[in-house]
Amino acid sequence: MVIIEQLLKGIHFVASVEAISLGVEAGIHPWILYDIISNAAGNSWIFRNYIPHLLQGNQIKDNFLNAFAQDLGTVLDIAKSHVFPLPLLAAAHQQILAGCRHAGADGLDGFKVNNLLSSVWEKVLGVQIMDAANAETYNPELLANQLCAKSKRPNKIGFIGLGAMGFGMATNLLKSNFCVQGYDVYKPTLCRFENAGGLIGNSPAEVSIDVDVLVVMVTNEVQAESILYGVDGAVSVLPPGSSIILSSTVSPAFVKRLELRLLNENRGLKLIDAPVSGGVKRASEGTLTIMASGADEALEHAGLSEKLYVIKGGCGAGSGVKMVNQLLAGVHIASAAEAMAFGARLGLDTRMLFDDIKDSEGTSWMFENRGPHMVDNDYTPLSALDIFVKDLGIVARECASRRVPLHISTVALHLFLSGSASGWGRLDDSAVVKVYETLTGVKVEGKLAVINKASALESLPSEWALDPLDDIRRLDNNLKTLVVLDDDPTGTQTVHDVDVLTEWNVESLVEQLRSRPKCFFILTNSRALSSDKASALITDICQNLCTAAKAVGNNDYTVVLRGDSTLRGHFPEEPDAAVSVLGEMDAWIICPFFLQGGRFTIDDVHYVADSDRLIPAGDTEFAKDASFGYKSSNLREWVEEKTRGRIPASSVSSVSIQLLRNGGPMAVCEHLCSLQKGSTCIINAASDRDMAVFAAGMIQAELKGKHFLCRTAASFVSARIGIFSKDPVLPKDLGIGKGKSGGLIVVGSYVPKTTKQVEQLKLLCDINLRTIEVSVEKLAMESAEEREEEISCAAELADIYLGSCKDTLVMSSRELIIGKTPDESLDINFKVSSGLVEIVRRITTSPRYILAKGGITSSDIATKALEAKRAKIVGQALAGVPLWQLGPESRHPGVPYIVFPGNVGDSKALAEVVKCWARPVRLSTKELLADAERGGYAVGAFNVYNLEGVEAVIAAAEEQKSPAILQKSVALFSLQIHPGALKQGGTALVACCISAAEQATVPVSVHFDHGSSKQELMEVLELVCHLLKIYFLEWANSYLLNFEVHTQGVDSVMVDGSHLSFKDNISYSKYISSLAHAKGMSVEAELGRLSGTEDDLTVQDYEAKLTDVNQAQEFIDETGIDSLAVCIGNVHGKYPASGPKLRLDLLKKLYDLASKNGVFLVLHGASGLPKELVLDCIKLGVRKFNVNTEVRKAYMDILKSPHTDLVHFMAAAKEAMKAVVSDKMQLFGSAGKAS
């Protein structure tokens, strides 16, 4: 930093001497120059502190210039080693070397100490500085006051040139109650001026008629000539005796020529040479410095409203002062660029460098003003670079005509010329730094560093030891009601068991306040509105709130304006609107900390977490928002930026993490109570404990009578009302089972984070997700007909997909379309959001759940599409993702509504929520039996042969549900396909079974029974992977549905090797088991052999064989099967007249063995078994019963009954089979166990 400071001091020193010398040659008293410029834009620390020594004729200190030259030579050597050009410093160094020579130096080791500083530079520049300094002086401000005292107030003022400074000057005249008529070539500026209360004209001549004073504030001499003497020029119509105030920066020679021309008009026209200095801000405030010169009679009209200096010497003297000021201002901007660029080359943090230099001897007014532009890489033109090409060009012409060598200003001129030649002339003058950046490849932009999250958090003091939330909860009855005005629905992301209102009429607010809640939300959705509309809305809500509070006698409330944790939204417009109704507050509290979203405020800088990094908020995608963009990451600077300087960063107070963690709530209270009324205070926080400590301290301050208006993110709200976090809410917590429809996901947020999350959603949830992409172009930019077609098509598809139990994603296309202005961008957002609303409104299927992504989208969907007037905040579906339950008045009462913010979570967060809330994937046969084992019941496996059979089983299962369904997820039954059924029904029957299982509202699995040949089983295994998929694709294509069908397929198979020898049975079962397991299918095998007939397969009694316990262990170990079909005297088909004779003792032994190996027991031949025997079998471990004969009999009995129509016959058959299935489910104990 010392090197950079030395560089600036050297340049500023030589520039100061050159400026004084030029002023002396122009006839300006040097002390007058010093007094004016030391309070103007040309000032620097060196000018203010060194020029008095020069003008007072002080002696040079021993080795002063020699030491200076050596220091600058060292800096130049360092620059050379870094291959970095320093043209300004090189010129300054040469001038100081010349000074050393003229000071009488003997070499560079020493020189005479009795030389005067002034005499050295008189020899160098050939200007008699001391004679001018010793001449009689005067007080320019006193002269101005004397003239103004005699001045007559003009009746009408003409003003030509309403540019950046001119507009501020003209509007300030209006504020001082002058009648002003303005003209500018830019028509929108004329409209602005008219809206501000001014009169406007269409030409220079039109605004010059009948004026007493004409102010000219154009850019250069050519423009001044044109507006005065060109077509429709002003001079030709000016009333005799009127005055022209020329405030443009022009050369003294031009002013003198103009005065002569006006004199020759012979109409008594007077010219005041009155250039100004101070910048746009001071122009609007009426505090510009005016350097006026001219005849005394003319000068009486110069004192209109600004800070005035009257310069003796006639017309041209004022421009002479301005010329000298611009010499210094231009050199100081260029030297700031050289210094900052060199600092970047040296590897310095340019933001820290700027902070250090502005408090050092190397500072200047221009360094402090333009340095932030360079550091922020913000070249929005407040004063264009080409202005200094002109102004330093004036300096160059003057020094050439007067034979005064001005090395520094000439080099600076050529730096600005280089910038203009590069195409940067219309950028801000601070863009001269780009010359250095382009030449050397450095970047001056001083972004706040991205820091390691873990390291940053570990470096902080330990948290406050005591948790204040318990104290806050104990104060519950004494706390003010917290009324949260939420600018989008995502602000509810840290609370639970709190109401949110979407309407704010007085009646609704009275009802809410009467119950004296500790907190409630009002959803304003104001972030989707323009600033004016948002302000009007907040005003309206606050007025209604005041009225309602008075009606119930509850005036004890605190308003929170919940805003975006990434700093987007209407600030300061909303707080301004609130205090206009609620009255001035003791302080505004700014607190964007939000742990769940990864938002931390440390050392006043707001960060957004990205994995293990903390990124300054101003460098994130959120800061580039078309409507609410910003540059500052430091919250103090952010407040100044958003208030446009109304609240300076230096006036913003801060509660530091050190205060929170070392001082606790009491220190917070003391800090808040010490603030001046109307203050703004930002809150640092890096943990929920920090937030709780602040909330507790704020409550103490409120109990002492303080009143605050809070602009915060969500974390403050939960801390302020003492809410503890709880686990994410899942469907089972709300008693939601499978249901008959899919979930609806609506994505409108366009930020890159959301786009990444949508990509991951489609990747990770592809199997059960259907996507409908809606064109933003058609919704927002095309004709009404194209918009309607896009909406209608999307709604129809969504209904089809939801009705097919598929989670359905309705998303806006990802291209970002922005308007030319923030309001146009908001209008485009509105059209897209309203299109999504209309799509959701037209969907008739009630979704399993609704998820809306993005704040504006979620608000509009809730209020406009779903017509919700209130909701209960149940909790969060994921950290930072609110979950509401819609009120009874909504279109889908009680349906869970997930409000997913656009800026929350990592790339997989959206997919994680959808997975949790998606319709449960049907359980496999193995899972069904495992649940049955735990529950001590059995699952019925029903053979089906046609669609009526499938429908009968599904209908019975869904009918047998009970309230216990919501308590645990246990399966009911299995659809079972027999080889005979496969032979008759083919692929279509299998596909039908699988589809029915997937669509059912209870868990269903699909099982292939009695695979007694390898060919049959291989066909089934391949069917899952190939034939079934083809069948479904053909079905989908026949309905013109543009999606691919994925399915879980057959869940399990039975390997029936009971007709084989023991060894062959093992071999066969093992082979099929390995293939099936590889495809995720569980396997059942039979040990022993049942007699009887089933589907034309007959086993004679003499072939039957009971299961051998001694073989069972080997069979299980070798085959790796999941279920064992046992033979204990059971038969296929009908039992003999004597009844079934089951070996229950054998069953017990088999269960003891199988259960140790995790294998489930299956009993075929359940038809005809007495109820008591079935129950005994279940007690002894049977978990699956095959049911066939009784179901078939019910079907056959219907065939025998008279039916006149096929449809009637099918319906009767279904009902008959359903009755049998229902009875079996009740018998097996599975009724009421489904979810």
Image: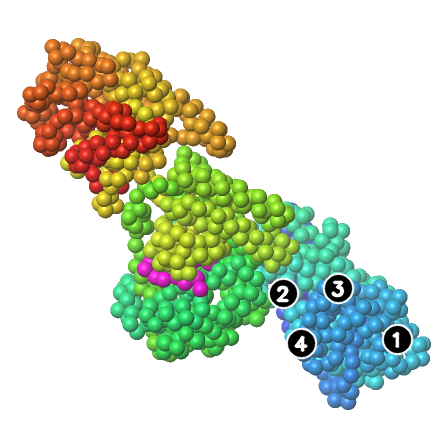
Q: Amino acid at mark 2?
A: Asn
Side of 249 relative to 1092 (left or right): right
State which mark lies toward you, 2 or 3. Answer: 3
Colouring? rainbow
> In this orientation, which residue lies closer to the viewer: 224 or 31?
224
Q: Quadrant of residue 1056?
A: top left
Residue 1002 belongs to the span the image colors magenta: no
Residue drawn at point x = 70 percent, y = 63 percent: 383
Q: Amino acid at mark 4?
A: Thr
Q: Quadrant of residue 258?
A: bottom right
Which residue does the numbered mark 4 point to in the structure image?
287
Q: How packed is label 3: few (under 14 Cα within 10 Å), some, or many (20 or more)?
A: few
The stretch of residues the image draws in magenta is 488-503
Q: Earlier in the sequence, mark 4 or mark 2?
A: 4
Which residue does the numbered mark 2 point to in the structure image?
369
Give the label on residue 187, or none: 3
Q: Amino acid at mark 1?
A: Val
Q: How packed is label 1: few (under 14 Cα within 10 Å), some, or many (20 or more)?
A: some
Q: Give SS at disc 3.
A: helix
